[in-house]
Image (spheres, helix red, strand yellow):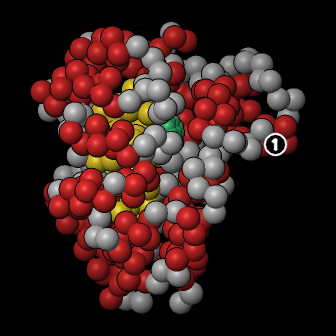
Amino acid sequence: MTTKDFIAKIPKADLHVHLEGTMEPELIFRLAKRNHIALPYPDLSHLKAAYKFDHLADFLSVYYQGTKVIRSSRDFYDITLAYLQRAATENTLHADIFIDPQAHLDKGITLAMMLDGVLPAVEESRKKYGISTGLILCFLRHRPLEESIQILQSIGPLQAHFAAVGLAAKELGHPPKDFTRLYEMAGKMGLRRTAHAGEEGPADYVRQAVELLRVDRIDHGNSIVEDPGLMQRVKDAQIPLTLCPLSNLHLQVIEDMKAHPADRLLRAGLKVTINSDDPSYFGGYMNANLLAVSEAFDWGQDQIIQVMRNSFDAAYTSPERKVEMHQILTDFINNI
Ligand code: ADE
Ligand code: ZN
């Protein structure tokens, strides 16, 4: 079996994927039409041509533009189902999905309305494709801390639908330490905690996420390689890193895939996972991400199996589901 076939077939998990970053251009246009929203792009080819990014902020303005077409629970249902259907074709067993409430509340869409669309799609996909899902309530770091705190304080019974809180958007100038109070509150509420850190920010942002936000996962974390002491600490604690190679390439975090820290970090014994981030914007879902790193570092089946086992361990799901996913992977390996 070629590495490409092996990657396509291996049971996998995607632990770092933004729901709003899974909208394919065709879906953006369909929702814009349905909701009578004017897009600043005359057609699909112009939208696709805008997918050239110099850095994170450049991407985020196109990404938030895309979120404007989302107006109803039905839209959330369609987006979630489209992603999970696509993930199922890649033999994805589990997905941890970020949702950005602050990108939708201003449009009059409540968290309950978002979940009215997302949850039926999650349930349908679980029944049809056997995919399990964790939802991450993702806060936007360029928005005021008080706004995030208010959302978390007023979440009520909807908390039951979220496995964790997350922190995303423009990293530089918005260090993790600014969100210490929010994360303290999330911890007291029994939510798990992850945060984007070290994507464009320095290793010190990763340190803050670990020490002040007390995260149980780090999203990206690339810049940890600048700080060997911190690397050792994250290794000892086996805090997983949700790396996103194609995202890093498209946002020019790295110059080419060979410069990606995935291989160094895996060799050093850190709990490396490979994920898709915003797959419709960065040229590929899980298979494409795994293939890109495998080709850059000449990874064989052993490394690919290792990162998948790491993902199952790190997934926001029950211990029983983790055991089940490991068993599905063992059966797959025994039958090739
Ligand atoms: N929101 C969606 N994708 C993101 C990324 N790669 N970094 C930070 N925030 C994001
Ligand atoms: Zn992300």
- Residue at 63% from the left image edge and 40% from the top image edge: 55
Q: Nearer the viewer, residue 26 or 301?
A: 301
- Residue at 38% from the left image edge and 30% from the top image edge: 175
295 on left or right of 147: right
Counting labels gives: 1
- Residue at 66% from the left image edge and 55% from the top image edge: 283
Residue 76 picture location, percent across and down: 51, 31
Residue 191 picture location, percent across and down: 20, 34
Q: Residues within 10 Å of mark 1 (few under 14, many from 20)?
A: few
Above or below for 126 versus 322: above
- Residue at 40% from the left image edge and 13% from the top image edge: 144
Above or below for 295 versus 167: below
Residue 114 picture location, percent across and down: 44, 24
Above or below for 221 versus 39: below
In this figure, which residue is indicated by the disc labeled 1?
Answer: 49
Residue 180 picture location, percent across and down: 25, 25
236 on left or right of 94: left
Above or below for 120 versus 295: above
Q: Is residue 291 visible?
A: no
Q: Nearer the viewer, residue 11 or 128?
A: 11
Residue 288 occupies which quadrant of the picture? bottom right
Q: Secondary structure at mark 1?
A: helix
* Image quadrant containing the C terminus: bottom left
Q: Nearer the viewer, residue 128 or 269?
A: 269
The amino acid type of the residue labelled 1 equals: Ala
Q: Is residue 273 visible?
A: yes
